[in-house]
Image (cartoon, rainbow, N blue to C red):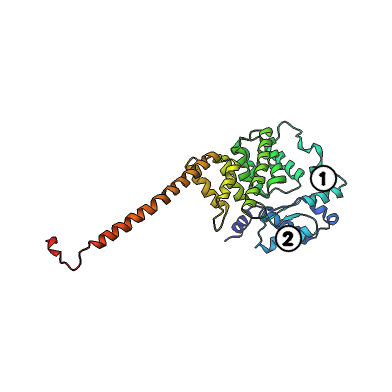
């Protein structure tokens, strides 16, 4: 491979960079060149892709977190750089831009993609990765959202829901909930917060601790939004897991799927179905002894008149 080809191959994967002004703030922030290398490596990994088996990433996150430069969320394997922006603002003698009251308003009527990215990074105190930017642009184009609405969606997502939902799935849910403007988005967020609470209630009913995972919340949304089951019906489905050896959300999903196929969508319909099954069981219990008695009686008669010691082979000729 020629030197020119090697150079082309070397740079075709893109670049990872940091702001030049950060280099000028190394001394006030107490940064070493080794710290800069750790920051670059975390940006290379992506702030939402800090894998526990990546020793370099874990060491970088641990060191920078220890210096108060980042937040490190070990449960979700994510980091954010807002503490570093706090330190920068303090060194500049200014209030952090993302704490200013007027930063949620837009100064121009033509708010474009570049301004959106800049505003998000300033107000949230983070570096958007290449993948973050691609996901934002994709959502704007796919769902035909304005950049102003996209700003609000990403801001609320980052501050309240990023520990629980993937951003693309969050946008899919929002679009499915008919989010077209800020008012409808606010309604969606309120319902989503309710969903998180109710999913936790299901988890507790199963006898489990902790917080619901993203797949568990997705299942709950499928039950209530797609299949139109009420929370009461979901909790009744949880009761069906009492005799299960390993009660889980998947077990509940099977129960609700069965109810949906049989059009059992209300507590009244479920009560009727359960009463019907109970009546059928009682009927079988009544009929079973009669059937068994008849079979025993017939067996005794057959045995009594069974010819013994006779050659009846001639009947077969």
Q: Depth check: 136 or 221 in front? A: 221
Q: Position of residue 279 (x, y in %)?
A: 46, 45
Q: Quadrant of the N terminus?
A: bottom right
| Residue at image point 66% right, 39% down | 191
99 vs 297, left or right, is: right
Q: Which residue is mark 2?
A: 60
Q: Residues within 10 Å of mark 2 (few under 14, many from 20)?
A: many
| Residue at image point 67% right, 42% down | 194
Q: Which residue is mark 1?
A: 96
Q: Secondary structure at mark 1?
A: loop
| Residue at image point 22% right, 61% down | 305
Q: CA distance from mark 1 to mark 2?
A: 25 Å
Q: Earlier in the sequence, mark 1 or mark 2?
A: 2
Instruction: Tell me, for residue 166, which label it has, or none.
Output: none
Q: Quadrant of the C terminus?
A: bottom left
Asked whether the viewer can see residue 213, the reply is no
Question: Do residues under tags 1 and 2 come within 8 Å of each other at their CB atoms?
Answer: no
Q: Position of residue 290 (x, y in %)?
A: 36, 52
Q: Residues within 10 Å of mark 1 (few under 14, many from 20)?
A: some
295 vs 50, left or right, is: left
Q: How many marks are shown on the rendered structure?
A: 2
Q: Depth check: 13 or 274 in front? A: 274
248 vs 77, left or right, is: left
| Residue at image point 57% right, 55% down | 247
Q: Position of residue 307 (x, y in %)?
A: 20, 64
Which residue sits furthest right?
93
203 vs 98, left or right, is: left
């Amino acid at each position: 491979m020629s030197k020119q080809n090697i150079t082309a191959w070397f740079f075709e994967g893109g670049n990872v960079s940091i702001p030049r002004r950060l280099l000028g703030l190394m001394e006030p922030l107490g940064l070493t060149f080794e710290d800069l290398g750790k920051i670059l490596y975390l940006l290379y990994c992506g702030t939402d892709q800090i894998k526990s088996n990546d020793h370099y990433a874990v060491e970088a996150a641990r060191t920078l977190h220890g210096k108060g430069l980042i937040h490190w969320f070990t449960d979700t394997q994510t980091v954010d750089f807002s503490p570093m922006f706090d330190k920068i603002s303090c060194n500049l003698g200014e209030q952090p831009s993302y704490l200013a009251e007027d930063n949620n308003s837009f100064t121009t009527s033509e708010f474009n993609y570049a301004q959106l990215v800049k505003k998000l990074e300033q107000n949230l105190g983070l570096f958007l990765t290449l993948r973050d930017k691609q996901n934002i642009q994709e959502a704007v184009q796919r769902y035909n959202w304005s950049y102003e609405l996209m700003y609000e969606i990403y801001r609320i997502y980052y501050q309240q829901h990023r520990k629980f939902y993937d951003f693309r799935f969050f946008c899919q849910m929002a679009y499915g909930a008919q989010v077209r403007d800020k008012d409808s988005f606010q309604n969606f967020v309120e319902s989503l917060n309710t969903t998180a609470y109710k999913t936790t209630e299901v988890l507790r009913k199963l006898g489990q601790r902790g917080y619901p995972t993203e797949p568990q919340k997705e299942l709950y949304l499928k039950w209530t939004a797609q299949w139109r089951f009420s929370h009461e019906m979901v909790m009744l489905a949880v009761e069906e897991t009492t005799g299960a050896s390993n009660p889980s959300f998947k077990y509940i999903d099977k129960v609700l799927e069965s109810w949906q196929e049989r059009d059992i969508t209300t507590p009244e319909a479920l009560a009727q179905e359960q009463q019907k099954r109970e009546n059928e069981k009682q009927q079988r219990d009544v009929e079973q002894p009669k059937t068994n008695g008849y079979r025993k009686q017939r067996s005794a008669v057959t045995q009594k008149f069974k010819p013994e010691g006779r050659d009846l082979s001639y009947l077969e000729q």
